[in-house]
Image (spheres, coloured by chain):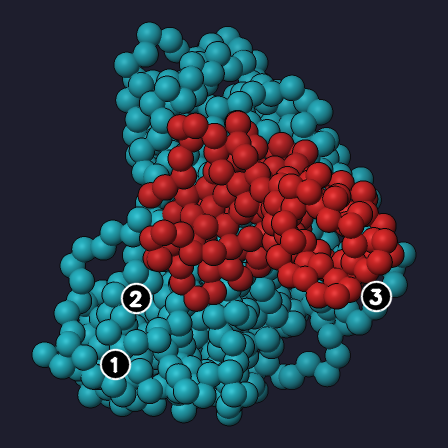
Amino acid sequence: MRHIISILIENEAGALSRVSGLFSARAFNIESLTVAPTEDASLSRMTIVSTGSDDVIEQITKQLNKLIDVVKVVDLSEAAHIERELMLVKVRAAGKDREEMKRIADIFRGRIIDVTDSTYVIELTGNGSKLDAFLEAIDRALILETVRTGVSGIGRGDRILKV
Amino acid sequence: MQLTGAEIVIRCLQEEKVEYVFGYPGGSVLFIYDELFKQDKFKHVLVRHEQAAVHAADAYSRSSNKIGVCMVTSGPGVTNAVTGIATAYMDSVPIVIISGQVPTAYIGQDAFQECDTVGITRPCVKHNFLVKDVRDLALTLKKAFYIAKTGRPGPVLVDIPKDITNQKCDFEYPKTLSMRSYNPVVKGHGGQIKKAVQMLLEAKRPMIYAGGGVILSDAADRLTKLARTLGYPVTNTLMGLGGYPATDKQSLGMLGMHGTYEANMAMQNCDVLIAVGARFDDRVIGNPSHFGSVARRIIHIDIDPSSISKRVKVDVPIVGNLPDVLDELQKLLESSDGVPDQKALAAWWKQIDEWRGKKSLKYKQGKEIIMPQYVVEKLYEVTGGDAFVTSDVGQHQMWAAQYYKFDKPRRWINSGGLGTMGVGLPYAMGVRFANPKATVACITGEASIQMNIQELSTAKQFRLPIKIINLNNRYLGMVRQWQQMFHGNRYAESYVDALPDFVKLAESYGHVGMKIERPADVEPALREAFTKHKNDLVFMDFLTDQTANVYPMVAAGKGLSEMILAEEL
């Protein structure tokens, strides 16, 4: 099962390596990991996407809680939540492809944020499968470069992760 | 008042009432050693290798429940200490390691004696710090001591760059501490404890399984009281020996890979199991699916939530500090209307007594060759069962655990989790510093002892009257045993050749050496060592049977009830 785990951690040097080291030392999977400071600069928020049986996910959350710098751990996927990922795609956009690329970007509600004679950079936000679908929809041969942030997530409604 | 970083380190150690610092100086810690030289509130023990400093601090803590402290320099000082730190980490021992680091501006420049200490030690410490500002130093040390001792204990390392130790700032040692990210649980969940009492009283074939947590949290008295109230059988893990008196009739001895027949059979066949400060280790329950193939209900008390349902699913998890939880359990039990089912219990004890009848620890001592088990039994008699016993790792460790009956906690000091050869002698040193009048014996083998033999020098300098019981079979005994049993008698690299003359070696360090070759000489030699040479370090080199194996044995991957017994071979 795929789980999205959100962590609030003291924004100290080495915080990221404590978390990533834990995953490699205990042979837990990481599909993606994102981290950035929160509105309170003393705290960082991490979002980790991992897969594993319920037992493994239970161990992951317990082991994360055990790290001294970790303030809170929540398994977002336990209840209603929203997940988003940002992707930037540089595509070849010349001749007949130029109009078609714009059209598909519009369909996916992507934005073109850089333009040259022959290329676009398209910004696209959504869950992972939407980003995958976009890449499927355009001609593979036209993709010059892609970069994805990994998943960020937040609980719906009253579910709040805060100190 | 403005103090230098070095002065602050010393003042913090004094504030923490540290008695001994085990360590080894070097470039990055010179300012600290300079301040250490100027004070006399605590003493420094100069070891001969940094690994031994950590082991000694570790045993100081294990045998006293105080925090062990050690100090090493940057680079090789730290890397030498890593085995010691990992050993303490695996057995949850509270120690604080202070390491020197190259000056702040040099970090990352591949400076002389530089290593990424925080990175190297991260996976084997409870927590570590790199101090980047002298103003953070006092609070960081306060946190280190606090984190080491609270919750599930463990080693904490503080890495201090050299320039920080020479910079000044105002000093005040924080009196209290609060960390938003670290609040260990103390009290157990009331509802869960109630359920546990209910389950314990419903048991027909109950079993108490007590681990190292009982020792670490000083819960032995409470566990003993609970066990006696219930009248249930108790087994201890290797780390838990002494947590329940081994000579008591309710004790089934140690369980696990080399546990007694009765302990392993009762563990496998019980219907209600209460695990107290134990973690269902692979050496304890063997194959988890074989263990899980028998229906039983499990109550598990531990301070570390991640130890619960890690290898074995449990029915009633209780997270909390053992003494608090056991007090609560005892109270509920005493006020409960229910009582244990005496009829079922009598039948269960009858079954256990049948298993005991197997006498799984019996061995034959002939007239010619000394059996290692015999030496441990005689040591037990000669010391009246009241010594602190340290061991190294291997066959001798198992024989020590099987044949020395520990009635008190903190008397049995060994590396259970990491299984570190070479701990025995530095452990004995640490024990003796923590317990200056105690009788201390180190049961070891000719291979293990050579892994930290240089500490005979430290022992001389500090006049530590340790009795080294060297069970010398000229083999890496446990390796040889596995090779015999599982690798077709191919003894790859397990013969220990070119051994030193241990008597002369001991004498060259200024100690007493003895060589014992005949069974009849074992007891007289031990008596001589513990009376005539009471105040000396005595290195007793016992030439023992080369082919003796440790039984019973649950082979790796097998189930607890699939023991190999001595008589079957």
Q: Residues within 10 Å of mark 3 (few under 14, many from 20)?
A: some
Residue A66, placed above or below residue B262? below
Task: Give amino acid for label 2.
Answer: Thr
Q: Amino acid at mark 3?
A: Tyr
**Which residue, given by chain and number where applicable, does mark 3 sit on?**
B491
Query: Residue drawn at (32%, 12%), measured in percent from left and top?
Result: B336
Q: CA distance from mark 1 to mark 3?
A: 54 Å
| Crowding near the residue tagged with mark 2, few <14, some 14–19, many ≥20 C-alpha atoms within 10 Å | some
- Quadrant including the N terminus of chain A: top right
Quarter of the image where one finds residue B146: bottom left
Q: Are marks 1 and 3 in contact (CB under 8 Å)?
A: no
Residue at 47% of width from left, 65% of height from top?
A: A14
In this rendering, would B425 be left or right of B408? right
Asked whether B354 or B152 is in front, the reply is B152
Q: Of label 1 and label 3, which has the lower sequence position?
A: 1
For label 2, the residue is B140
Q: Position of residue B317 (x, y in %)?
A: 47, 28
Q: Quadrant of the C terminus of chain A?
A: top left
Q: In front here: B145 or B433? A: B145
Residue at 16% across / 74% down in the picture? B171
Q: Which mark is residue B5?
A: 1
The residue drawn where x is 79% and y is 54% is: A98
Distance in Å between CA atoms under marks 2 and 3 = 50 Å
Q: In the shown orientation, is residue B257 left or right of residue B349? A: right
Q: Residue furthest left?
A: B1
Q: Is residue B357 visible?
A: no
**Colour chain A appears in:** red
Which chain is cyan in the picture? B
